[in-house]
Each structure stands twice: as C-alpha cells, then as structure tokens.
Image (tube, coloured by chain):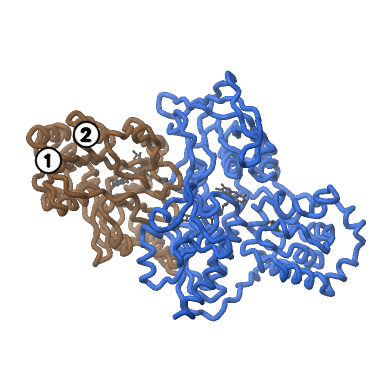
Amino acid sequence: MFKARIFFYFWQLKILIKNYFRQKKMSKILEKEFFSKNVVKLVLEAPEIARTRKPGHFVIVRIDEKGERIPLTISAADEKKGTITLVIQRVGVTSAKLCNMNVGDVIMDVVGPLGTATHIEKVGTVLCAGGGVGVAPMLPIVEGLKKAGNRVITILAARSKDLIILEDQMREFSDEVIVMTDDGSYGKKGLVTAGMEEVINREKVDLCFVIGPAIMMKFGALTTKKYNIPTMASLNTIMVDGTGMCGACRVHIGGKTRFVCVDGPEFDAHQVDFDEMMTRLGAYKEQEYEAYQKYLQTVEA
Amino acid sequence: MENIIDYLKAERSQEWRAEVRKRMKAKERTSLQRINMPEEDPDVRNKNSVEVNKGLAPEMAIAEAHRCLDCADPTCITGCPVGINIPKFIKQIEVEDFAGAAVTLKETNALPAVCGRVCPQEKQCELNCFYTQKLDKPPIAIGYLERFAADWERNSGKMSVPKTEKHNKIKVGVVGSGPAGLAAAGDLAKYGYDVTVFEALHEVGGVLKYGIPEFRLPNELVDVEIETMRKMGIKFRTDFIVGKTATFDDLKKEGFQAFFVGSGAGLPRFMNIPGENLNGIFSSNEYLTRINLMHAASDEYDTPVISGKNVAVIGGGNTAMDSVRTAKRLGADKAMIIYRRSEAEMPARIEEIKHAKEEGIIFMNLHNPLEYYSDENGRVKQVKLQKMELGEPDASGRRRPIPIEGSEFIIDVDTVVVSVGVSPNPLIPKALKNLKVTDWGTIVVDPDTMQSSVPEIFAGGDIVRGGATVILAMGDGRKAAAGMHKYIQEKIQAN
Ligand SMILES: Cc1cc2nc3c(=O)[nH]c(=O)nc-3n(C[C@H](O)[C@H](O)[C@H](O)COP(=O)(O)OP(=O)(O)OC[C@H]3O[C@@H](n4cnc5c(N)ncnc54)[C@H](O)[C@@H]3O)c2cc1C
Ligand SMILES: Cc1cc2nc3c(=O)[nH]c(=O)nc-3n(C[C@H](O)[C@H](O)[C@H](O)COP(=O)(O)OP(=O)(O)OC[C@H]3O[C@@H](n4cnc5c(N)ncnc54)[C@H](O)[C@@H]3O)c2cc1C
Ligand code: SF4
Ligand code: FES
C-alpha cells in the first residue's frame, strides 16, 4: 500500500514535469470533502472555466493518460480564487478513481465550460427536485433562480439519510427545503414524486426542475405533466468529447435526435424519450462492470 | 501566376536539372514499370494496427524517379492544390539528394509525410501527370515519392526546423489544431508572430489524430511535426474551447490581434431512420474517436467500445473505409460497406478501396438502410436494406441512386457505423453572432485572403469548405496566414 502510494506520487511528478514542458495546464485538487461514503466534493484549480461558467454548465474530465473522458457538472465556482467545485458519486471506475484522489493530486484534463447554460429568469414559484447526485448540478440552478427573484422550493431526495447531500447549501438559497428518503431515515418517507405532488397541491408552481437518475426524472416529468407545469430535466447521457463531435450523447427530444452535450444538458422534460435514454445509458454495462471489478482488485491489492 | 511559371522555368533550366534529363532517353524512361508499394500481408494486417504501406526503399524511389520526364510543361503541378514543385523534388530523388527533395516539398507543403499518405493523388497530381494524360500509362507514383522523401528526412534525425523571422511579439491565435490550423500556425510563426494554437480536445492534430487510423497514418508521425512546431516557438493549449473556455473578446483583451479559425467539420450526420439510436450504432466520429483518440481497443485504457462480429458501415468515403477496416481489425467476422451508389461513385481514395477488398471487407454497393431492429436489451440486431439503381447525374455530377421498390430485405448486424458525412462545427458560428455563415453553416470568407466578415477573424479548411481534404485545408491555412500578415501589418501602419 505504502509502496503504491510512493509510486503514485512519483508517477504524478513525472506527468507534471512532462506537461510543464508541454505547456499543458493541469488541474490541481485544492480541497476534498466526503459528503457521504460514495459522494465526494472536489475543488479544482481551473481559472478560465471559473471565469466563464454559468449555472447548467459542465466540464469533461480525464484523470490521466489512460483515462476516459467523463462529464461532471460544475456545482459551484469561485472566480477570484480561480476554482471550480465538482461533486462526484462513485458509480464505476473513473468516478471511483476521482473519489480516491487527494488534495495536491492533479487531474490531467479538465475542459469546459460545456453545454448550454440554464435559462434563468423570474417566473414566480419554482420547484426544484434533486435526487441522489442530481442535487449537485441543482445547486447552481437553485442559487441562480433565487438571485433572479423567484420563490424556490427545493426537494432533496435519496434512498436514506446518509445519501442526502448539500442540505445546508441548498437552504441558503431556497425558501423551503423538503427532504425525502425512501426508507424514512430522515425527513419525510416516500419518493420524490410524492413530495412534488404535495407542493403542487398546496400552491401554484410555475416551473419545475428535475435532476437525478433517469428513472427519477422520468417519473418526475410524468408527475408535472399531469398538472401541466413546464419542467426542465438535466440529462446525464454517456459522452465522449462533449463538444458535439461524436453523437454518443444523442437522444430523442420531441421526436428529434438532439446532442445533449451541445443542445443540452437541459431539455423540456415532457419531450425527452427517457426510455431510450435509459437504454443508451446501459450500452456498456458489461464492460463497465468488468472494469470496475478489475479496478476494485487493484485497489485492494 | 506569371511569376510562378517563370520561377518553375528558371528552376528547370538549372544546370543540374538539364544534366539529369540527359542521363537517360525519354523512351527508356517511359519503358520503365511503375513501382509497387510494399504492403503488409492483408491477412496479417487485418488483425493489427501496423501501417499497411511500408514505404519505398531508397533504390525503389530512385528507380521510380527515373520514370519522371521532367516535362517542360509539368501538368502534374496544376493538379496539386498547393503547387508543389513536383519535377524538382523527383529529380532530387533521382540524384539521391533526399534531404533536398524534402526541402523542396516543404517550400509549399507543411506536412509532406502526411500528404504523401492521405492525398487522393489519383484525382490530383497523378491524374494530371503526362503518363496518365498522354501515354495512357500508370502515372509517376508522386504520392509514394513524396512520402519517401519526407520519411527519409524524419528518419535521418536531421529534421530541419524552419527559419522564423525575428520575433515581433504580436500575439495571434489559431483555433483548432487540424491540418488547416497547423499549416496556418507554421506560417504565422515563420512571419515572426507569437502563435498560440487552441484545441478543444486533449490531443493536437484534429482529424489526423482522432479520425484517420494508425494503419494509414501513424500518430507518431504527426507528433514529430508538432514537436518541430513547438521548436519554432508555437504554443499549444489543449482542452481549450474558443467561445467557451474564453471568448474571442477575452482573448483580444489578452492581446491577441487576429485569429485563424480551422475548427473543422465536426458535426456527424445521421440518416434519421427508425432505430438509429439503438445501442451498437455509432457515428464514424464516435467509433473512430473511441479507438484512435481514446485507445478503447487497448485493455490498459479505460474507455470502452462495442465492436461486434457483424459490422455494417454505412457510406463510401474515406471515413467509411477507415471505420470498416478498423472493425475488421477489432475482430469482426463480417465487416461490410453498405453504400447507396456503385463503386465508381465512391468518394474514398482508390488505394483504400483496394486495401479494404484485400483485407476481406464485404462491399454491398447499391444498398441503403431503411430501419434498424433491436434485441431485448436495446442493442441493434438487424437492419432492413433496400436495393438501389443508378439514375441521372445529380448536382454533384454523380449518378443519383434510386430505390428499387419491393427489394427490401433484412440482414443480421450487431454493430453499425453511420458514416454519411459531417456538417461544419457549429461552436464558432454559435459563439460569434455577427460572423457571416452560409445556410450550410460554413464560414463565408474572401477566397484570396480567407478573411471572414469579422475583420480580425480568418478561416479555412473544413469549416469553410464543409468537408474536403487534408491538402486543401493546409492550403487554406497558409493562404490565411498570408492574409493575416497583410491585415496586421496594414493595421500597424495605419496607427
Ligand atoms: C452533463 C452531465 C453532467 C453530469 N454531472 C455529474 C455530476 O455532477 N456528478 C456525478 O457524479 N456524475 C455526473 N454525471 C454522470 C457521470 O458522468 C457518470 O457517472 C460517470 O461518467 C461514470 O463513470 P464511471 O467510469 O465512474 O462509471 P462507469 O462504470 O463507466 O458507468 C457507470 C454508470 O455511469 C454511466 N456512464 C458511463 N460513462 C459515462 C459517460 N462518459 N458519461 C455519462 N455517463 C456515463 C453509465 O451509463 C453507467 O450507468 C453527469 C453526466 C452528464 C452527461
Ligand atoms: C476518418 C477520416 C478519414 C479521412 N481521410 C482523408 C484522406 O485520406 N485524405 C484526405 O485528404 N482527407 C481525409 N479526410 C478529411 C480531412 O481529414 C479533413 O478534410 C481535414 O482534416 C480538415 O482539416 P481542418 O483543419 O479543417 O479540420 P479538423 O482536422 O477537423 O480539425 C479541427 C480541429 O478544431 C478543433 N476545434 C473545433 N472547434 C474548436 C474551438 N471552438 N476551439 C478549439 N478547438 C476547436 C477540433 O477539436 C479539431 O481538432 C478524412 C476525414 C476523416 C474524418
Ligand atoms: S501534395 Fe498531394 S497533390 Fe500535391 S504532389 Fe503531393 S500528393 Fe500530389
Ligand atoms: S458527447 Fe460527443 S457529441 Fe455529445
């Protein structure tokens, strides 16, 4: 274990030197915090992105020479310090590697800000429902909506108490925060859709955001459809380049194929073909599972 | 034009050229046979990523160079989009001055090792060669010789770093690091500018890196060229999307005076037929990017790729050939081209079609896909095809494919690569509202200077032409560099 660590530092140093000469800007991890066992907050050095990003934007990250490119939402940024904040949920190899990185480590590639920024304006009352790690991309949206003068009601949903994240930060910008857990270990017991319906039945909601696992967004969208409330979802399709070059992220929206990385990631939730999106998310299930098992062995060894 | 012809005449009448011409009678030269390119065995190479063409040995190149008649009116040059002094470099090979040949190539072509490999010579220089035009014999192997001279220089370890003018400390930006951007950057550095190339991806090279596979254009070769450019003082900023990471205005505030946009034709087209979003169906850009840029076929890299046993590639261009030959190399039992016209209309280089056939690629020409069907997991399992016939020529001059009613049938596939063309990359037009673009999304430029409707922005390559060739992209880049130089110098004088 100790040996592995030394080797790791040495290897990172090598990359640093190599890239210094290549004039490559790498991103150093400046802060790390565990929100739960499998959800980590990382603050990275990325001055240009910190300056130009807006709510709804994401970055593509590649950890090292052999890494894959994965999209992650910019959940906050500090222009003065030149940093961006990412919140990562451990689901497979790359997210696990990120969760295992530490302050001082460097990430080889961080590119962005990508996607179309959230359209934020004053509409009245906005209901923001975030499930699981979908809470992280919701944070800048909630902040933006509040600053634009909206009444913001936020629902945080997760399977159990220890998976509820960013509650304090959300409270800062929300008029009300409702916590829902599947098992009732914290807040109200029930699914996110139950919480949504409660609010909708209670007061007039002008706009809704649902961000979370595809299945949650699908049912969230069905719920608001019943009440004819305009709803936005932020899609988390598989991506490669994130610049509109490959089409890996494509999905049918209102019967037309759109590229999530450039046309989205936010779309009218009532138009999204969530079933197609879920199928496409599973395209590499077998390879991902195998790779993760292999990775776990290397970490444990 | 006048002075180019005079220049070529003067070069041709140099003593050494006249002497070489006399060494052998024209009759004797024309009776020599065209050299064959040594190739990897098709049954071996279709399982690995080794370069297919092995390159000529010096004696082969010299023999081929003897065929060239050093014509008084070198028509081959008119076929070359950048006007390489073809007879000169070939005669230099004949007298074994390989280094000199490389220098001649580099006078007009920034990346001869690349062009020698990927130019459609049969439609350019070699088409216009005296042998093709008048003798009805196979043309001089200009492409092979170009590659030979460039490779020789690289392998000699004595790559010359082009001379640059005194550094003038004026900052200029190049957006995109494909052939257009690289050519522009090279010339701008020669003029003395402080050049920064911005690239959206994590690697420099554009299509040369993420598109064209290793077996046709080894990455290492592109890297060597880029290293030379670094030595010329050119800076590269990867992971930097102009218009996103920073806007043109941000960059202007940082002191950039003018920009060259070579952002390429990055947007893949689909056919919008039912089932096209099933798993196992890719754009060729995605398929090739996963394999060439992300190394998905290697276990050591994290990116996965699906590549099955029954692979159908839709299209007939270079991109389709690259995809289908890649699929074969990844272990497909059946790797098929499905193309709606006939072989005569295929836009791919002839050599690639020949190589594909040797490697066991199945060609289903005059067929068009109508619909894809999925298995229970959402993975493509079949495609419905329709037979086509050729009608009258269309706007492109190629005969129009017409569907034959009632000819539909279904075949099994487990992977499909859609390779039906690309559209101009929309990132820059989106980021610059006052930039004039065509209905197709290409940037409108002055054809002489490559200047766009925004005075400080110049453009070239696929973003202007909408999908062309490496050599045309490079030609644009160089023309734009000259245009930018003129623009900046005039601006300075006006102040
Ligand atoms: C616009 C956008 C914003 C996102 N923001 C966040 C965020 O802020 N925090 C967060 O934790 N996650 C976010 N994701 C999802 C995140 O990208 C994936 O969880 C990550 O790529 C998984 O990689 P892996 O190697 O760890 O897992 P894998 O083993 O590769 O896959 C596990 C799961 O992740 C999905 N996935 C795999 N590769 C990708 C890929 N390249 N792109 C998207 N999904 C993929 C798979 O469908 C699978 O369900 C976002 C996705 C998108 C498209
Ligand atoms: C698979 C394939 C095979 C081919 N085979 C041949 C062949 O054999 N012979 C031939 O002559 N031609 C071939 N071509 C065509 C040829 O590659 C292109 O015509 C040529 O690469 C165009 O060059 P370019 O510099 O205009 O653009 P590209 O090579 O596409 O480069 C554009 C670059 O700009 C970057 N970029 C875009 N927007 C931005 C931005 N906003 N900020 C920063 N960077 C940005 C992109 O990431 C990309 O790297 C082939 C093309 C493909 C895809
Ligand atoms: S650059 Fe292309 S067209 Fe010009 S001589 Fe070389 S192969 Fe022929
Ligand atoms: S990720 Fe490649 S086009 Fe969207």
Q: Residue at x 57, y 73 (%)?
A: B190
- Residue A296 visible to the viewer: no
Q: Which x, y percent locates residue B252?
A: 38, 69
| B223, above or below B330, in the image | below
Mark 2 and mark 1 lie on one chain; the one further toward the N terminus is: 1
Chain drawn blue, letter? Answer: B
Q: Can you tell which quarter of the image residue B448 is in?
A: bottom right
Q: Which mark is residue A179?
A: 1
Please state if B97 lies on the left or on the right of A91 as rendered. right
Which chain is disc 2 placed on?
A: A
Badge 2 amino acid: Gly
Which quadrant would the N terminus of chain B be assigned to in this image? bottom right
Split into quadrants, the picture shows ligand 3 in the one at bottom right
Q: Which residue is mark 2?
A: A220
Q: Nearer the viewer, mark 2 or mark 1?
A: 2
Which chain is disc 1 placed on?
A: A
Please state if B98 lies on the left or on the right of A279 as rendered. right
Q: Which x, y percent locates residue A190?
A: 13, 32
Q: Residue at x 56, y 58 (%)?
A: B179
Chain drawn brown, letter? Answer: A
Badge 1 amino acid: Val
Q: How many numbered marks does the figure carry?
A: 2
